[in-house]
Image: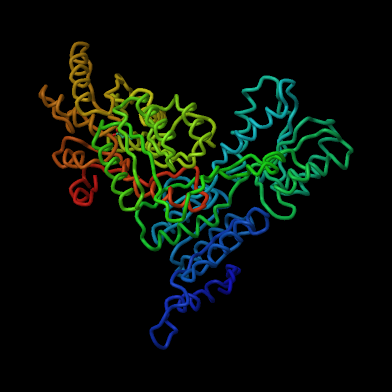
């Protein structure tokens, strides 16, 4: 196929040219029906097209587009101006694009126009996010994590003796600058003997970094490490040190681009001590855009791309950026997946199990399913059984967050890839699994609190009872964090009791019965129940009714999951709100397993797209609920 060229139009020409392009796209110019040249026009609004990393992003988008004859890309270049990018988006929208891909110059400034675009068409955010959730999908790296990994690496480079660092930042106000710096400084702060002696700003530019650092080194003398927020600035820093004849200064960058002058080459030649790959997500954006335009189900809200440390050693050993991939014995080999489930605590879990079993069957994957019966040791035993049976892939949902390192290392040593679904683990080494897919539990807690505050809209004291999930599990820990984070801005809201109901309906009922007795004995009032899942809320509702309380009226109840029974309770006026947490992860997991086995790189984190259901929408929404 002849590679199709990107259209890179100056924004002022777009209104004139796009209607023609779009009428062609829609077949309006054709004399007779026939195959269209392309079915979809995608507007790609770039913050700039001058930085090597962004040029790489554009090239990746075009390389992937070349595989899809039904797509046409129209690029705009905001030349680092938010005002100009706002105009670009307006022009693209007025011209009738089908989907917008945007890498915002600045988050806050671009948020309103992105929200406006999202009201009209799907929007994919690339690399940088906006304020709020008015977009279809975010694809990008976790910049805070990159900064943290860089800090940990620099600490290991300096060793016990410690040392002095100068940090060189990209352009002020650009979102990765703050995130990378916070992550870096957090990691360094844990080392008593390392000091960040100064922070320079070089706007992502090599020559500016060289000039700034040259004058700094002249004034202050040598340091041990330069941490630059991209490879171009790292290269500039290295040049400054060379020019001044400074020996032994180690320079670390971020980006890890391939090709001439890219970070990989700079590390290979010894110019940089290390860099961190920072994928642009261009390819993933095109693939996801097509999925969205084709109305595929299960489009996630966020795809966080994997970053890896690149050193000379990792390049030479071939370990760079690739998770060890097992070789399938033959192309028609039936993939065997071992899945270790948490248990059967809730309707959510039953729906999750069903989703996994059905999706495996439909995908032609052989599933070895083990029920952990709420015990971590059973799950670990199951994973060891899968390793012994030499399954192709292992997946599991972690009953509790901690204590998985050993068994995950055993799986890695056996070269069996692991997928974590639903509940994350608290292991630092992300190379122990391929991908983590599931909900953002912290955000679910925040959503519950935001809904509550909007609903009650009061400055009077509000007494809250919290029913937590399983002690030590990620959803219990994170939902509490998110809920309390929002409440901390409203001192009149107070959690007066917080106990675990273990995510079981029956335990929720028992625990609530006891709480009601205790509150009565101490003459305290409960205004609100926040339950970490719907099942516990439904159990608590039964306990309240047994004492004559009217749940949903005397006590406002908000819980998490969005199971069918919660909708029925909302319709009956007994539950006020359910925050969605989707268990339907089976199809996503099977697709990821197959993609991985066929050689594709996967995001390290895939966050499910979810919403909030207040009681007033329950009746309309119930018929379409799938769990
Ligand atoms: O991990 C997801 C949680 O586990 C669900 O919210 C809860 O119902 C389940 O048991």
Q: Can you say which quadrant of the picture contains the C terminus? A: top left
Q: Residue at x 23, y 37 (%)?
A: 347
Where's residue 306, x and y in %? 55, 43
Q: Can you say which quadrant of the picture contains the N terminus? A: bottom right
- Furthest residue toward right: 245
Dividing the picture into quarters, in which one does residue 311 lie? top right
Q: Residue at x 44, y 25 (%)?
A: 402
Q: Using residue 501 as the reference point, say whether residue 334 is left or right of it.
A: right
Q: Is residue 103 above or below residue 487?
A: below
Dividing the picture into quarters, in which one does residue 578 lie? top left
Q: Residue at x 44, y 38 (%)?
A: 390
Q: Using the rendered image of the protein, determine whether residue 178 is visible from the camera's viewpoint.
A: yes
Where's residue 612, x and y in %? 31, 43
Dividing the picture into quarters, in which one does residue 259 lie? bottom right
Where's residue 337, x and y in %? 39, 43
Q: Using residue 36 as the reference point, say whether residue 495 is left or right of it.
A: left
Q: Using residue 283 as the reference point, say whether residue 437 is left or right of it.
A: left
Q: What colouring method underlies this structural image?
A: rainbow
- The residue closer to the viewer here, 202 or 604, is 604
Q: Is residue 73 above or below residue 79?
A: below
How many numbered markers are drawn? Answer: 0
Where in the image, quadrant-wise, is ligand 1 located? Answer: top left
Where's residue 111, x and y in %? 48, 51
- Furthest residue toward bottom: 31
Q: Residue at x 81, y 36 (%)?
A: 216
- Furthest residue toward top: 521
Q: Using the rendered image of the protein, determine whether residue 483 is visible from the camera's viewpoint.
A: no
């Amino acid at each position: 196929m002849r590679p199709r060229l990107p259209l890179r139009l100056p924004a002022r020409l777009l209104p004139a040219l796009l209607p023609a392009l779009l009428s062609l796209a829609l077949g309006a110019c054709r004399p007779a029906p026939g195959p269209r040249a392309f079915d979809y026009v995608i507007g790609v609004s770039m913050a700039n097209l001058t930085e090597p990393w962004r040029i790489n992003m554009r090239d990746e988008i075009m390389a992937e587009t070349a595989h899809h004859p039904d797509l046409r890309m129209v690029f705009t270049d905001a030349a680092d101006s938010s005002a100009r990018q706002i105009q670009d988006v307006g022009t693209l929208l007025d011209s009738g694009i089908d989907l917008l891909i945007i890498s915002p110059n600045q988050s806050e400034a671009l948020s309103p126009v992105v929200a406006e675009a999202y009201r009209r068409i799907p929007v994919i955010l690339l690399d940088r996010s906006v304020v709020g959730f008015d977009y279809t999908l975010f694809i990008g790296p976790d910049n805070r994590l990159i900064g943290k990994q860089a800090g940990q690496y620099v600490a290991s480079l300096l060793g016990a003796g410690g040392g002095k660092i100068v940090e060189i930042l990209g352009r002020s106000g650009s979102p990765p600058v703050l995130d990378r710096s916070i992550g870096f400084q957090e990691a360094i702060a844990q080392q008593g003997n390392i000091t960040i002696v100064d922070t320079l700003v070089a706007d992502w530019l090599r020559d500016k970094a060289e000039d700034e650092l040259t004058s700094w080194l002249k004034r202050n003398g040598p340091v041990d490490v330069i941490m630059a927020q991209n490879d171009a600035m790292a290269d500039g820093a290295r040049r400054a040190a060379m020019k001044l004849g400074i020996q032994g200064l180690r320079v670390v960058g971020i980006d890890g681009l391939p090709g001439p002058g890219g970070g990989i080459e700079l590390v290979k030649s010894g110019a940089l001590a290390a860099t961190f790959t920072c994928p642009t997500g261009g390819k993933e954006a095109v693939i996801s855009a097509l999925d969205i335009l084709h109305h595929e189900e299960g489009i996630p809200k966020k795809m966080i791309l994997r970053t890896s440390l690149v050193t000379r050693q990792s390049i030479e050993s071939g370990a760079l950026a690739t998770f060890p991939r097992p070789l399938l014995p033959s192309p028609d080999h039936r993939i065997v997946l071992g899945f270790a489930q948490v248990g059967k605590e809730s309707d959510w879990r039953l729906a999750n199990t069903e989703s996994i079993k059905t999706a495996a069957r439909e995908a032609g994957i052989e599933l070895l399913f083990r029920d952990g019966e709420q015990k971590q040791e059973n799950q670990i035993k199951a994973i060891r059984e899968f390793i012994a049976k030499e399954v192709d892939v292992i997946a599991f949902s972690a009953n509790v967050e901690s204590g998985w390192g050993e068994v995950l290392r055993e799986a890695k040593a056996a070269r069996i890839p692991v997928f974590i679904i639903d509940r994350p683990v608290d292991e630092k080494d992300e190379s122990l699994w391929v991908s983590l897919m599931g909900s953002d539990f912290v955000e679910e807690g925040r959503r519950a609190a935001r809904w509550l505050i909007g609903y009650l809209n009061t400055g009077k004291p509000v007494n809250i009872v919290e029913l937590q999930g399983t002690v030590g599990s990620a959803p219990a820990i994170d939902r509490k964090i998110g809920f309390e984070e929002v409440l901390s801005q409203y001192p009149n809201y107070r959690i007066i009791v917080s106990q675990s109901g273990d995510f079981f309906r029956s335990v929720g009922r028992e625990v609530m019965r006891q709480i009601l007795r205790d509150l009565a004995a101490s003459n305290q009032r409960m205004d609100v129940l926040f339950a970490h899942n719907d099942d516990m809320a439904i159990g608590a509702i039964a306990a309240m009714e047994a004492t004559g309380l009217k749940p949903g009226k005397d006590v406002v109840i908000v819980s998490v999951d969005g199971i069918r029974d919660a909708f029925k309770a909302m319709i009956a006026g007994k539950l006020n709100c359910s925050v969605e947490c989707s268990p339907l992860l089976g199809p996503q997991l099977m697709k990821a397993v197959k993609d991985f086995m066929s050689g594709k790189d996967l995001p390290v984190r895939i966050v499910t797209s979810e919403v909030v259901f207040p009681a007033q929408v329950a009746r309309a929404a119930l018929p379409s609920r799938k769990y």
